Image (cartoon, helix red, strand yellow):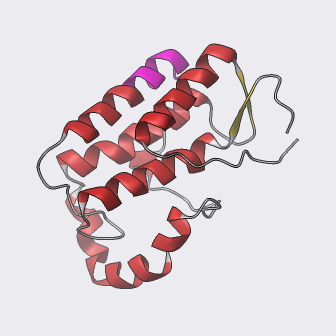
Amino acid sequence: MNDLRQLQFSDLEAAVADARQLLAGGYVRQGNWSLGQICRHLVLVQDPSVDGYPAWMSLFAPLRPLVRRLLLPKVLSDDSPRGIRTAPIFVPPDDLEDATEVEAFAASVGRLLGHRGSFAPHPGFGRLPRERILEIHTAHAAHHLRHLRAEGDSA
């Protein structure tokens, strides 16, 4: 029962489709967060790629080359690391409505995909090309959504 889904998305739109399917058909949690919490977390992490991250997150900029070399390949793999604590500003509250948050995630993805300027430097990985930022957000969505499985699916 505690096996996570093997999940890789081709793009962020596929992650939105998965979230909508889980919402429509029901889901079983295999982690700490509901669908709504996962979608809020994804929005909280994605939106700063367009809007910019808080200044304090650049304090660790000197470590970015090392983090990029050591952690980025793991993040992009289909078995990204679990149990890494996130900054409190990216932790979703408990009392979220799944449907509202799924649509907010869809809107955030649309905004990200429609953004034509350069993306803000990632706090851990620094300035990256558009394709790599989208790849990171896509892998991040799969990392979290794999903790939910469709109601009725055997684990």
Q: Position of residue 54 (x, y in %)?
A: 23, 55
- Res 84 visible: yes
Q: Nearer the viewer, residue 125 or 78?
A: 78
| Residue 142 at x, y percent in the picture | 56, 47
* Residue 94 shows in this picture: no
In this picture, is 96 found above or below 81? above
User: Left or right: where does residue 63 sit relative to residue 23?
Assistant: left
- Quadrant containing the N terminus is top right
- Give the residue at x 42% y 35%: 13
- Residue 108: image quadrant is top left
Q: Quadrant of the C terminus?
A: top right
On screen, residue 123 above or below 54? below
Please identify the residue farthest to the left as the structure is shown. 117
Above or below, comparing residue 18 to residue 136 in the picture: above
Q: Is residue 71 magenta?
A: no
Whether residue 100 appears in magenta in the rendering, the answer is: yes
Q: Is residue 121 left or right of residue 97?
A: left
* Left or right of 43 in this view: 120: left
Say which quarter of the image contains residue 131. Answer: bottom left
Task: Estimate the x, y position of residue 94 in percent, counting from the top left.
Answer: 56, 30
Residue at the spot x=70%, y=18% of the render? Answer: 26
Q: Residue furthest front?
A: 10
x, y percent for residue 2: 84, 46
Q: Which residues are magenta?
A: 93-104
Compared with residue 43, is residue 50 higher up or lower down, i.e. above or below?
below
Q: Give the residue drawn at x 58%, y 50%.
A: 143
